[in-house]
Amino acid sequence: MDQFIINGGARLRGVVPISGSKNAALPIMAATLLTEGETILRGVPLLDDVESLSVLLRKLGANARRDDDGAIRLRVEDEQNCVAEYELVRKMRASICVMGPLLARRHKAQISMPGGCAIGDRPIDLHLAGMENLGADVDLIGGDIHLRAKRLKGAEMFLGGPFGSTVLGTANVMMAACLAEGTTIIESAACEPEVADVANYLNACGARISGHGTPRITIEGVKSLKGCEYTIIPDRIEAGTFMMAAAITNGELTLTNCRMDHLLAVIDRLKAVGVNIERKDGGAVVSSARRLEPITVATQPFPGFPTDLQAQLMALLSLADGNSIITEKVFPDRFLHVAELNRLGARLRKEGQTVVIEGVRRLIGAPVMASDLRASAALVLAGLIAKGQTRISRVYHIDRGYEAIEKKLAAVGADIQRMAE
Ligand code: EPZ
């Protein structure tokens, strides 16, 4: 297993190219199971999760390979196997999004029930309710979900849950509905840009989806879909992470390939902290005053402040002049980074779904352990500013969702190295 060794203190300066969105690429790759012919996806980031999904798609009869120019070519060649086994789903929950395509195209699917993970319980009841609304029979047998449907029929449904909408649940039902008979309306659909990107890809393949990006999505079923060439949207969570890297080191970073309209809630909160963010030809220039203001924020489904940037913001606010408050409303247990940040000298106190952050003057480097993808990113941000050396173990978590993060950081002045543990 690899670790990062970071010597803190450098003020980051330079240009950071933002990669394609992991959370758009994964469901879009799964959506190719619905299509005939070849799909060429551009802008797919080089991530362990992308490789894991490619392994699963190959087991499901797709030819999935990356060209020398970085594009991923996908073509379904055999539709016999409909099983997404535990070993693969356990490693990556996003595998769940092969459910809708398999059911719609092959009329059956057997998907291992995803277990919990570092950010808490990960139920899929809304996914299954959506499939049943479309007319599927759903049974849980020996830890696997068995779904069957001769022909899915369009339906109206409400897909909101106790924590708001479901991103992959919306993508799954939307994908299944593309080949269903008749019209499907999803009320309380997820509005995330990644879900809209899946819809845009499917429409480019001949689907008839409207309302994506809003809480009500309408899908008119069609007979078939044809693969196409498509470019994935930029990763707004990576962009937000690097904005905070500029802010925490009092540096100045220019982010290219960054969609500001996907980050309005993040920009609003960072400006309240005292971070300067200016649009610049298709990207952003980010810098911060030395003094960081404390703020209050609660995570929400899009367009609210994203849960995937909660840990990174907590690292930044650890150095604000005063007390900040973060409330996590999407994944109430998503706080494994709190204890690790406290090891670096932060003063964080968790009270249920809320953490009170008492700003400190400095963080002190120490050995810490990554736990989930975004918590790991928070530890990297803290290490960039902590006095002395920070050693982050288990960085395989970060490799799942950030393309060559240590190289991008070193290129703008960070003293960070990857070493075998
Ligand atoms: C997606 O996960 C993202 N993953 C997550 O990003 C992200 O944190 C999350 O959306 C929220 O934005 C991918 O896109 C691959 P949800 P997803 O279904 O779809 C509850 C990262 O770091 N819920 O929107 O699995 C659920 O427990 C990852 O890149 C149900 O109750 O999340 C949670 O509290 C981490 N029943 C809330 O809804 C269900 O059937 C939101 O979950 C489904 C979800």
Image (spheres, rainbow, N blue to C red):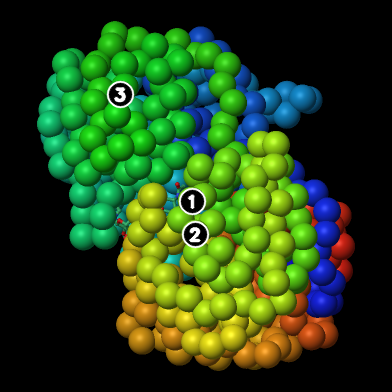
Q: Which mark is on residue 264? A: 1
* Relative image position of residue 211 (x, y in whole percent): 29, 29
Residue that badge 3 annotates: 210
Q: CA distance from mark 3 to mark 1?
A: 23 Å
Check the image and report above or below for 263 versus 249.
Answer: above
Left or right: where 329 falls relative to 60: left
Please tell me in which quadrant of the rendered image residue 313 appears. Answer: bottom right
In the image, what residue occupies the spot 78% across and 65% down?
251
* Nearest to the observer: residue 42 or residue 281: 281
Left or right: where 137 falls relative to 40: left
Q: Which mark is on residue 221? A: none
* Relative image position of residue 330 (x, y in whole percent): 34, 62
In the image, what residue occupies the spot 35% across and 16% down?
207
Check the image and report above or below for 114 versus 107.
Answer: below
* Relative image position of residue 337 (x, y in whole percent): 54, 76
Identified by mark 1, the residue type is: Leu
Check the image and report above or below for 23 versus 72.
Answer: below
Residue that badge 2 annotates: 268
In the image, what residue occupies the spot 87% across and 62% down?
413
The answer to whether any part of residue 137 appears in the image is: no
Identified by mark 2, the residue type is: Asp
